[in-house]
Image (spheres, rainbow, N blue to C red):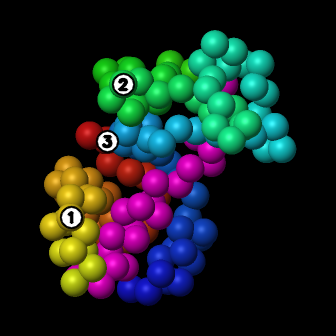
Amino acid sequence: MSMDEVEALILMNPLDCGSCSNCCQSSPGIYILEELDDDPSLYEGYLDYKDGQPILKTKANGDCIFLDRENGCTAYDIRPNPCRSYDCRRDYMKWVAEPRAERRALLKRGFLKKHVQQEGRKRLKSILSDGSTALPSD
């Protein structure tokens, strides 16, 4: 499957998030962008600044400051635009579209964790086999 086919499949099917919170773990930080209707005042006390731009703080382990690994996002109702619009299917489907040699190289270098590989396959199989856009819960 080519990346163009992957992108077309994603665009045709709306996402029903499985709330796995993988995208909130070990993140490089989320920018709060006023041009995307994010209000930095909602996150007062939870912001750092990178190149003059407000960015959500992260915990020592790299998780988003608002992530509770047991209960999910503690700021879900006011989460910023990048969190509201993130489509995790691109991560999983890119894994399938990558040539096998490149996947092996990524694994060997430690860029892809085993659980991401397993979850991606399980979720992709669900999406591709029955046309469903709902991601299975963990």
Q: Secondary structure at mark 2?
A: loop
Left or right: where does residue 2 sit relative to residue 118? right
Mark earlier in primary sequence (3, 1): 1
Dominant SS of magenta comes to helix
Q: Secondary structure at mark 1?
A: loop
- Find the magenta span and give its range: 77-100
Left or right: where does residue 117 sit relative to residue 27? left
Residue picked out by circle 2: 60
Question: Between 19 and 66, which is closer to the camera in this rendering?
Answer: 66
Q: Are discs 3 and 1 less than 8 Å apart at CB?
A: no
Total numbered labels placed on residues in the image: 3
Q: Which numbered tag is attached to residue 137?
A: 3
Q: Quadrant of residue 54?
A: top right
Q: Are discs 2 and 3 less than 8 Å apart at CB?
A: no
Nearer the camera: disc 2 or disc 3 = 2
Q: Residue at x 47, y 64 (%)?
A: 90
Mark earlier in primary sequence (2, 1): 2
Residue 81 highlighted magenta (yes or no): yes
Q: Residue at x 79, y 44 (%)?
A: 36
Nearer the camera: disc 3 or disc 1 = 1
**Quick check: can you spot residue 81?**
no
Q: Is residue 68 above or below residue 137?
A: above
Residue type marked 3: Ser
Residue picked out by circle 1: 109
Q: Which numbered tag is attached to residue 125?
A: none
